[in-house]
Image (spheres, helix red, strand yellow):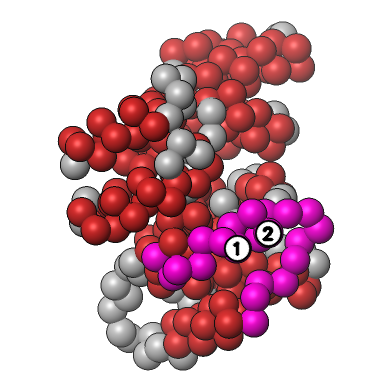
Amino acid sequence: MTSLIAELKARLPQAEWPVVVAALRNEAQTWAELQDSTFGLQALQAAGGERMHWSPGYLGLLRLNQAQHFEPLRATPLQAVSEKLRYEAAAAYEQLATRNPDTTHSNPDLAQATLIALALRERRRLLNGWEQLADDLSIAPTEYWKLPIACLFGLIPTQHELLENLLAADQPDDRHELALHALVSNPLTLDAQSAHLLEIIRNYELPQLMALLRSLAQVSAPLAQQAALQALEVLQEKQSDDHDGLSKIQRL
């Protein structure tokens, strides 16, 4: 919707509207729902010039008419979801978990994804960690989880903790894919995105690092380039004798 981009340009500072547009376009379902003129107008009125209000999490709460909970959900320490949302989120997750395993999973819309995200958030609050997340995600294919995890990323105060879990070196590639999608689908600045990444991938072995950077390049070339440059600096400090490894990153 060309008019949506024009409205975003008019409402957001010049340095921020490209960040918002890039994040929105990286999340296909969110972008598609904003093409509906009614919801698009509602989002413009509610989110306005607040960059983080253009995150999937905020927009999902807006779909649920619960946008007033956005800031409290992001506050430290992690607070419980309101009773109404907690009930709806638990019901949404239970429905997903009890679905016939042979049933084809259609990807969730923004409202459904937000409820699923809130269910995962509540489990994190009760269990005080993400150790159970792999089991939580095992009930549906990776593609299903892209939007819920993108929503979840914007609805917690400890975003880096979630990324650390999903991007751990011993996690499979599909978990890395979810983390990267969440990172590029939320309207963080390039510097903030790369800071999150570098803190985690600085301890990767070179083959893992190269694989992650190649995956990242497919969803955000600017972030992949910046992360590669920063990773190169770290490798130059740690492995000055590994000229082959350094040259691989330089060629990326």
Residue at figure coordinates x 32%, y 75% from the top left = 105
The numbered mark at residue 231 is none
165 lies above or below 226:
below
Number of dots carrying numbers: 2
The numbered mark at residue 69 is 1
- 161 drawn magenta: no
101 lies above or below 208:
below
Alpha-carbon neighbours of circle 1 within 10 Å: few (<14), some, or many (≥20)? Answer: some
Q: Secondary structure at mark 1?
A: helix
Residue 195 position, x and y percent, is 65, 28
- 80 drawn magenta: yes
Residue 242 relative to residue 252: left or right: right
Residue 64 relative to residue 31: left or right: right
Residue 52 position, x and y percent, is 53, 42
Residue 217 position, x and y percent, is 40, 30
Q: For the magenta stretch, what is the residue range?
A: 63-83
Residue 44 position, x and y percent, is 36, 46
Q: Nearer the viewer, residue 157 or 199?
A: 157
Do labels 1 and 2 touch, CB within 8 Å?
yes
Quadrant location of the N terminus in the rendered image: top left
Name which residue type carries label 1: His
The residue identified by callout 2 is 72
